[in-house]
Image (tube, coloured by chain):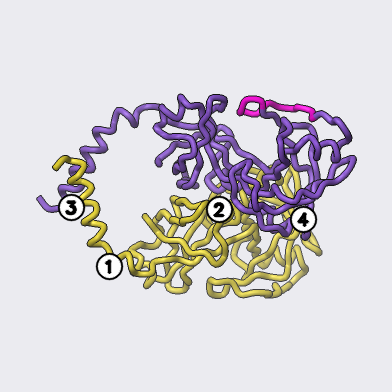
Chain colours: A purple, B yellow
Amino acid sequence: MGKYDTLVDLLLEVIKEGGDTREKDNSIPVGISNRHIHLSQADLDVLFGAGYQLTKTKDLSQPMQFACQETLTICGPKGAIEKVRILGPVRNESQVEILLADCFKLGITAPVRLSGDLQGTPGITLVGPKGSVFLTKGLMIAQRHIHMSLEDAKRLDVSDGQKVTIQTDGLRGGTYTNVVVRANNTSSLECHIDTEEANAMNLKSTSKITITK
Amino acid sequence: MGKYDTLVDLLLEVIKEGGDTREKDNSIPVGISNRHIHLSQADLDVLFGAGYQLTKTKDLSQPMQFACQETLTICGPKGAIEKVRILGPVRNESQVEILLADCFKLGITAPVRLSGDLQGTPGITLVGPKGSVFLTKGLMIAQRHIHMSLEDAKRLDVSDGQKVTIQTDGLRGGTYTNVVVRANNTSSLECHIDTEEANAMNLKSTSKITITK
């Protein structure tokens, strides 16, 4: 038997032995993020008035996170985008997550970053009903990531910080690499991608993806 | 030596033997399409006046194809999108290629289709300086595809109509499946994706992709 035949036979055998694992439901719900803003209380005070409290309109899938009634205009050197949603609760530092397409409209090149990793990111102007703020940093395109509990991580055989590849089928199917696992005790299982990433693969908020590593 | 070790050794050997093939430049330039319109002469006459001729501003990569100075407003039941570019020359049938994100704004669900495959697609209203046209069909999201000559097809070991998978590396790397090969005597090598597909993988007009099948 030639080398290639041996290879094919071995591959088939290994795949067959993995059959039990493949029958488990390892699918992961998709959460699709449009451009949005996280604010510090200090910036919220300037934009909406001293001591202002955000108005929750909808709980998000991750514990404690919610969409707010409030929106802002974000302005760059080339253009502005109106009605950008604020997400609560307030954070230590303000952060603006945009789509890659928005960079062209705003006239600013933003890097792909994990939420919270603000060092070296460009700034942007936020305009609210009571004032405006020029953030010196905090503008980014969100790096795709998967929130999960530590139990989910164990079940899916991945660990916090690991970069995995996700897959979806269909006419606009494919894979995305460098999807960061964010596993801790307080997270719910959900793969976060932005609207451009979702549209490019025709993924909806009811879609599920799988990890292929 | 165990089954897994044998498998790994064989894989490494096969990969090594494939070294010559991998050194060939099989990369393919990327062409990124924003929403655009192809018009029939009859529709052009209604929208811009009888006997109107399109004004070329830029040659496109495919022979005879060009971008025009003229734009139109496209209108659906929910909203309108202004300044949608017309591409020339005129065709037998009018066709409007939009982004998946545009469906939400227009209030119309458009299917993913290859250019020219209009049967069963929804219609849309086009508004020009001299009149408007209600197309009864022709609205689609372009299915990603690769134009190439027959020589390119032979060199890349693919054939006209074949669906292949393309790959790119980097922080937003990944693969897209169901990319249709369009090979004929008059085409130049270029992989056409829309702006959402490009942005989701951080592909620019200077980027190149490879076919992985």
Residue B182, by quadrant, is bottom left
Q: Residues within 10 Å of mark 4 (few under 14, many from 20)?
A: some
Is there any visible trace of residue B70 in the rendered image? yes
Residue linked to disc 4: A76
Q: Residues within 10 Å of mark 2 (few under 14, many from 20)?
A: many
**Is residue A185 left or right of B87 when viewed as pictured?**
left
Q: Chain of mark 1?
A: B
> Up-down: is B61 above or below B175?
below
* Start-end of magenta stretch: A54-64
Which element type, helix, strand or loop, lies under badge 4?
Answer: loop
Which element type, helix, strand or loop, lies under badge 2?
Answer: helix
Residue closer to the observer: B169 or A90: A90
**Is residue B90 left or right of B208 when viewed as pictured?**
right
Residue linked to disc 1: B20
Circles 1 and 3 in contact, beta carbons < 8 Å? no
The verdict on a common chain for dots 4 and 3 is yes
Calculate the distance from the C-alpha at mark 1 to the C-alpha at mark 4: 49 Å
Residue linked to disc 2: B197
How far across and down, in percent of the image, does residue A118 sit?
A: 65, 46
Calculate the distance from the C-alpha at mark 1 to the C-alpha at mark 3: 18 Å
Q: Residues within 10 Å of mark 3 (few under 14, many from 20)?
A: few
Dot label at residue A4: 3
Q: Amino acid at mark 4?
A: Gly
Q: Chain of mark 2?
A: B
Q: Residues within 10 Å of mark 1 (few under 14, many from 20)?
A: few
Calculate the distance from the C-alpha at mark 4 to the C-alpha at mark 2: 24 Å
